[in-house]
Image (tube, helix red, strand yellow):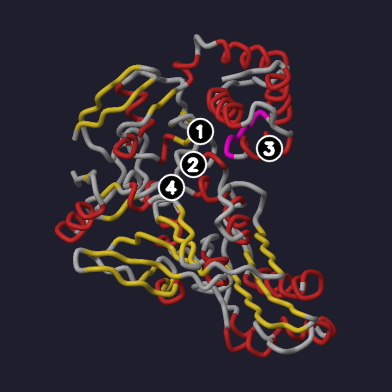
Amino acid sequence: MTIEFTLNGEKVAYEGSPLRRLIDVLREDFGLIGVKEGCGEGECGACSVLIDGKNVPSCILPVGAVAGREIYTIEGLRDTEQFNILMDCFAEAGAVQCGFCTPGMIIASVALLKHNPKPSEEEIRHWLAGNLCRCSGMNMIVEAVKLASERGIQW
Amino acid sequence: MVNGYRPQTLDEALEIRANTGAIPLAGGTDLMVRHKNIPGALPKFEEPVVFISHLEEIRGVKAEDGIVKIGAATTLAELENDEKIPAVLREAISNMAARNVRHIATIGGNVCNASPAGDTLVPLYALDAGVKLASTNGVRTLPVQDFITGPGQTALAPDEILTEIVIPTRSFTKEYYRKVGTRKAMALSRVSFAALADVNGGLIEDIRFAFGAVAPTVVRSREIEKQFISRTVDEIKGDAPQWAQKFAPLLKPIDDQRASAQYRRKVAINLAVYFIEEIL
């Protein structure tokens, strides 16, 4: 089956089983290894991507479900002004230790800040609840998102 | 290799379902985990799969003729912010998984998964919800408690697709929902509880209790509920533990990694006592 979708701003076509996990297609076929596999069960958020602006775990989503949708991975955000603000805020807040959860955390933060550029702390925690940091940097990550919001990040 | 189908219309999906026995896959958040394989390999589906999450005919919420109609492929994230959805159901949904999973998980998927700990089921039982099932031969509607027949078991025929959840539009003067899990997000329910009541001039006119994760299917008893009707709130509150205990014989919880049966039984009754004493 051919599945067409937009990936990091470009129209792409995938040819193969629609049952393959989106994470495998992104990593193996498109070389987008910023998409990390943690739990493989949608529990940890390391594999998060944006689909039509919403953060979604790509390890439990078959590629057949994304036809016609707009997908962004961390690689597709790299050159945006907003990503650079977020990256600075993550660095300043000390929100990165081993870095494995970071792409997923950034994706979740982007989805939240698109939804609401001025979220409350409760809302930040609510939106990041599906992303786990095992270095225990959760509070610093929440601080980083607050900082980005204070700096007036806008989409 | 099993096939995946991506129909353009519901009719086409129903044809595929009838002809191939394909499993409907909406958000996939339960099915993909159940059929998980090693990383990089295809998920282990034994039957073909028909994708339905993109079908507009089974998406969205309408309130008409005194009924809230929820398309089965509407995502949980869409429902948690929709004012047309009864508050008790929205409360349950906002406690399910986490926002990222709710962006793809659907209400129809949660209902068809028929887990004893399925979090939409508890409010749906309390709200007298029904499910609309379509096949190439037509459409039928069942009350949700007749649709769910056991753990992971439903009355869905091999050629049917769940297309809509229907809830009578109705407000209650008292509403309560509580999920008890290991943490706030991403936890499966150890116990969940929904209760609704109409109290007028101190008299109970309608009352519903639904308990989740304490039996093979959600526990609700219209017989016990009837005993509350036309009594005063003061009378019930005066002996809350005894009234709550009426449900105890219906609770048949299991021991598992999330909680012991004894814990589940105790917490379920405590939640009913809390509702009677503090909310009613």
- Alpha-carbon span between mark 3 and mark 4: 23 Å
Mark 4 surroundings within 10 Å by alpha-carbon count, few (fewer than 14), some (14 through 19), many (20 or more): many
Q: Identity of the amino acid at label 1?
A: Asn
Q: Which residue corresponds to the image point at 24% horizontal and 43% vertical from the top-left?
A: B6
**Disc 1 on helix, strand or loop?**
strand
| Numbered label attached to residue B29 | 4
Residue A42: x and y in percent read 48, 41
Residue at image mark 3: A123
Q: Nearer the viewer, residue B58 or A137?
A: B58
Residue at mark 3: chain: A
The magenta region covers A130-135
Mark 1 surroundings within 10 Å by alpha-carbon count, few (fewer than 14), some (14 through 19), many (20 or more): many
Q: Which residue corresponds to the image point at 56% horizontal and 76% vertical from the top-left?
A: B219
- Alpha-carbon span between mark 4 and mark 1: 14 Å
Q: Which residue corresponds to the image point at 36% horizontal and 22% vertical from the top-left?
A: A7
Residue at image mark 2: B103
Q: Nearer the viewer, residue B215 or A3?
A: A3
